[in-house]
């Protein structure tokens, strides 16, 4: 019978697919879990739920409801104490990653299969999905969009006031895709202001 570590290690070998989501997992939690999962039966402490909140920017951390930051002294479907169910957890691709966080040092990127397995078993405070893109310089490779960029667009008005708005986008999008985002954003801004 395979250990949990061997199962996850096997799932982690699956390549990231363009258009799918990868997930960020705090390195400290990953290290605790790896130590726990490698020893069967484990004599090490249970790793607890996946704690990603410290990967968020300070401003984003204040937006996470207190209920998702607290541990509960109840047993959930995993059978382990202090693992909250995920009813108050958050999942948002637009959470701003702390600019000081570095991949490999502060967090690990895992594929959907690994995240699904671990998050169901251990629970989590904040889910941090990130879109997987084709590498614009190497079509056989993929890139994970860790940090969105904000583009400020100004449309000059004829005889009136310029129209300016911000568009959240991926740094991996092509110019044509960026233009599509701008047009969609402008349409939604125009339709909401005319209502």
Image: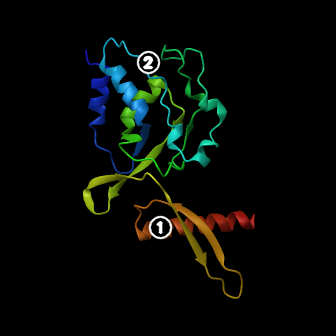
The quadrant where residue 13 appears: top left
Q: Position of residue 156 (x, y in %)?
A: 62, 82
Is 27 positioned to the left or the right of 161 in the image? left
Evaluate whether residue 170 shows in this view.
yes
* Mark pair 1, 2: CA separation: 45 Å
Identity of the residue drawn at 54% across and 18% down: 82
Is 109 positioned to the left or the right of 140 in the image? right
Counting other residues with Cα less than 10 Å from the Cα at mark 2, is it few (<14), some (14-19), or many (20 or more)? some
Identity of the residue drawn at 54% across and 32% down: 125
Identity of the residue drawn at 48% across and 23% down: 48
**160 in relation to 94, above or below:** below
Q: Position of residue 143 (x, y in %)?
A: 34, 53
Q: Name the residue tied to disc 1.
A: 178
Is 20 positioned to the left or the right of 65 in the image? left
Q: Position of residue 99 (x, y in %)?
A: 48, 52
Q: Name the residue tied to disc 2.
A: 46
Q: Quadrant of the C terminus?
A: bottom right
Mark sitting earlier along the chain (1/2): 2
Label placed on residue 32: none
**141 in relation to 30, above or below:** below
Counting other residues with Cα less than 10 Å from the Cα at mark 1, is it few (<14), some (14-19), or many (20 or more)? some
Closest to the camera, between mark 1 and mark 2, is 2
Considering the numbered disc 1 on the image, is that residue within a helix, a strand or a loop?
helix
Q: Quadrant of the N terminus?
A: top left
Considering the numbered disc 2 on the image, is that residue within a helix, a strand or a loop?
loop
Say which of 104 and 114 sits in front: 104
């Amino acid at each position: 019978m395979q250990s949990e570590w061997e199962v996850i290690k096997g799932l982690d070998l699956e390549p990231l697919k363009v258009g799918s989501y990868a997930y960020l997992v705090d390195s400290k939690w990953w290290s605790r879990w790896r130590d726990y999962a490698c020893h069967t039966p484990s004599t090490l402490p249970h790793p607890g739920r996946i704690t990603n909140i410290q990967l968020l920017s300070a401003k984003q951390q204040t937006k996470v409801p207190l209920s998702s930051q607290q541990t509960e002294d109840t047993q959930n479907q995993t059978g382990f104490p202090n693992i909250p169910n995920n009813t108050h957890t958050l999942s948002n691709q637009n959470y701003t990653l702390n600019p000081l966080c570095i991949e490999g040092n502060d967090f690990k990127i895992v594929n959907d299969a690994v995240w699904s397995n671990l998050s169901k078993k251990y629970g989590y405070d904040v889910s941090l999905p990130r879109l997987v893109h084709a590498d614009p310089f190497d079509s056989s490779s993929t890139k994970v969009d860790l940090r969105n960029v904000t583009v400020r667009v100004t449309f000059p008005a004829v005889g009136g006031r310029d129209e300016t708005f911000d568009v959240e986008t991926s740094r991996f999008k092509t110019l044509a895709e960026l233009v599509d985002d701008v047009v969609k954003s402008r349409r939604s801004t125009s339709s909401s202001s005319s209502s």
